C-alpha cells in the first residue's frame, strides 16, 4: 500500500502545481460557472415568488437557494473530466508510452483527478461553501448545517467523485474508436448537467422518471450528496443511497477494466 501511494501521489501533487501555474484560466472558468449559479438563483427566486410560498418538489425557497450553490460546490469538486486527457493521449499516440510504463494508466488519471478536485475544493469551493453557510444563517435565518450532515456530505461527495471519474474513463475509451471526441464531450456535459440534477432537482420530475434515475449512476454524482447536505435522507434511505454509490463505483471500475482490455488489444500507433 505504501508503494502504491508513493507511486501515484506525485500525480496528484503535479496536477495541483499545474492548476497553480494556469490559475488565470482556471479563475476565468470559475467566474463563468459561478455566474451561471447566480442566474439559477434569481431564476428560482422568481419561480418561487410566483407561487404561494410553499415547497416545490419537496424543497422550500430557502432550501432551493442552498441547493443551487451547493450544487455548484459539489460539481466543482466532483466533475473532474479525465476523458479529455485520454483523447489527447490517443491523438498524440502518447498512450502507447503509458502501456509500457510500470504504472496503471487509469490510476494515474484518477490521482490526477484527485489533484484537480483538491485544488477546486480549496479554490474556490470551500469559500463558496462558507458563504452559503453564512448566508443561510444570517439572511435566511436557517441553522448551521449539523456536523453529521457535513461528514455524510463529504463522504458522499468522495463517492460521487469516483463515480464520475470512473464513468468519464469509460467515456474516454470512445476515443480509441473515434480518435476525436470533443463534440461528444460537449454533448456529455449538457446531458449530465440535466441527469445529475445540476440544472433541475430530480425531485421535480414525475415519480416514474425518478425511479428510472434511481437505476442510473448520474443521480449519485451531484444530486445525492446535495440532498444529504440538506438532510433529505435519513435512516435506511440514507444507508441505501450511500450503498448505491459504492455499488456504482464497483460496477464502473469493473466496466472500465473490461473496456480497457478490449481497446488495448486493437490499439495501433503510427509514427514515433
Image: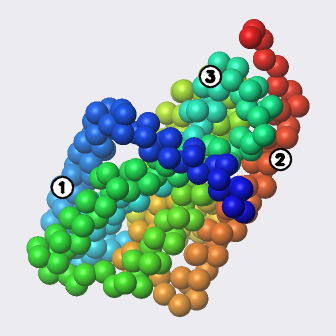
Residue 11: horizontal and vertical position, in percent?
Answer: 57, 44
Give whichever of discs 2 and 1 has the lower sequence position.
1
Q: To which residue does mark 2 refer?
A: 258
Could you say whether the residue bearing mark 2 is in a helix, strand or loop?
Answer: helix
For the question of whether residue 51 can be seen, the reply is no
Q: Looking at this view, is 1 or 66 the one in front?
A: 1
Apparent side of residue 144 relative to residue 100 in the rendered image (left or right): left
Q: To which residue does mark 1 refer?
A: 42
Could you say whether the residue bearing mark 3 is in a helix, strand or loop?
Answer: loop
Q: To which residue does mark 3 refer?
A: 180
CA distance separating discs 2 and 1: 45 Å
Report the residue that reaches farthest toward the bottom. 235
Residue 28: horizontal and vertical position, in percent?
Answer: 27, 36
Q: Which dot marks residue 233?
A: none
Q: Quadrant of the C terminus?
A: top right
Q: State yes or no: discs 3 and 2 in contact (Cβ < 8 Å).
A: no
Quarter of image, res 178: top right
Residue located at (23% from left, 45% from top): 35
Q: Quadrant of the N terminus?
A: bottom right
Q: Looking at this view, is 241 or 22 the one in front?
A: 22
Circle 1 packing at 10 Å, graded few (<14), some (14-19), many (20+), is: few
Foreground: disc 2 or disc 1 = 2
Amino acid at each position: 500500500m505504501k508503494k502504491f501511494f508513493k507511486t501515484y501521489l506525485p500525480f496528484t501533487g503535479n496536477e495541483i502545481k499545474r492548476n497553480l501555474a494556469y490559475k488565470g484560466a482556471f479563475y476565468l472558468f470559475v467566474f463563468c460557472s459561478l455566474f451561471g449559479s447566480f442566474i439559477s438563483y434569481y431564476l428560482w427566486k422568481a419561480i418561487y415568488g410566483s407561487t404561494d410560498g410553499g415547497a416545490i418538489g419537496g424543497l422550500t425557497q430557502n432550501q432551493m437557494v442552498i441547493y443551487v450553490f451547493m450544487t455548484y460546490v459539489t460539481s466543482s469538486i466532483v466533475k473532474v473530466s479525465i476523458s479529455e486527457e485520454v483523447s489527447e493521449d490517443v491523438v498524440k499516440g502518447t498512450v502507447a508510452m503509458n502501456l509500457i510504463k510500470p504504472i496503471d494508466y487509469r490510476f494515474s488519471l484518477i490521482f490526477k483527478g484527485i489533484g484537480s478536485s483538491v485544488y477546486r475544493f480549496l479554490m474556490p469551493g470551500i469559500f463558496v461553501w462558507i458563504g452559503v453557510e453564512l448566508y443561510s444563517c444570517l439572511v435566511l435565518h436557517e441553522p448551521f448545517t449539523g456536523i453529521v450532515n457535513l461528514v455524510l456530505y463529504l463522504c458522499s461527495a468522495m463517492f460521487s467523485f469516483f463515480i464520475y471519474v470512473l464513468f468519464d474513463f469509460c467515456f474516454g475509451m470512445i476515443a480509441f474508436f473515434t480518435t476525436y471526441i470533443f463534440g461528444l464531450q460537449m454533448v456529455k456535459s449538457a446531458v449530465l448537467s440535466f441527469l445529475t440534477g445540476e440544472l433541475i432537482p430530480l425531485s421535480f420530475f414525475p415519480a416514474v422518471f425518478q425511479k428510472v434515475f434511481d437505476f442510473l449512476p448520474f443521480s449519485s454524482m451531484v444530486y445525492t450528496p446535495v440532498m444529504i447536505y440538506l438532510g433529505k435522507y435519513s435512516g435506511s434511505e440514507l444507508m441505501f443511497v450511500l450503498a448505491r454509490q459504492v455499488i456504482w463505483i464497483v460496477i464502473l471500475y469493473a466496466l472500465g477494466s473490461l473496456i480497457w482490455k478490449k481497446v488495448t488489444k486493437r490499439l495501433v500507433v503510427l509514427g514515433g
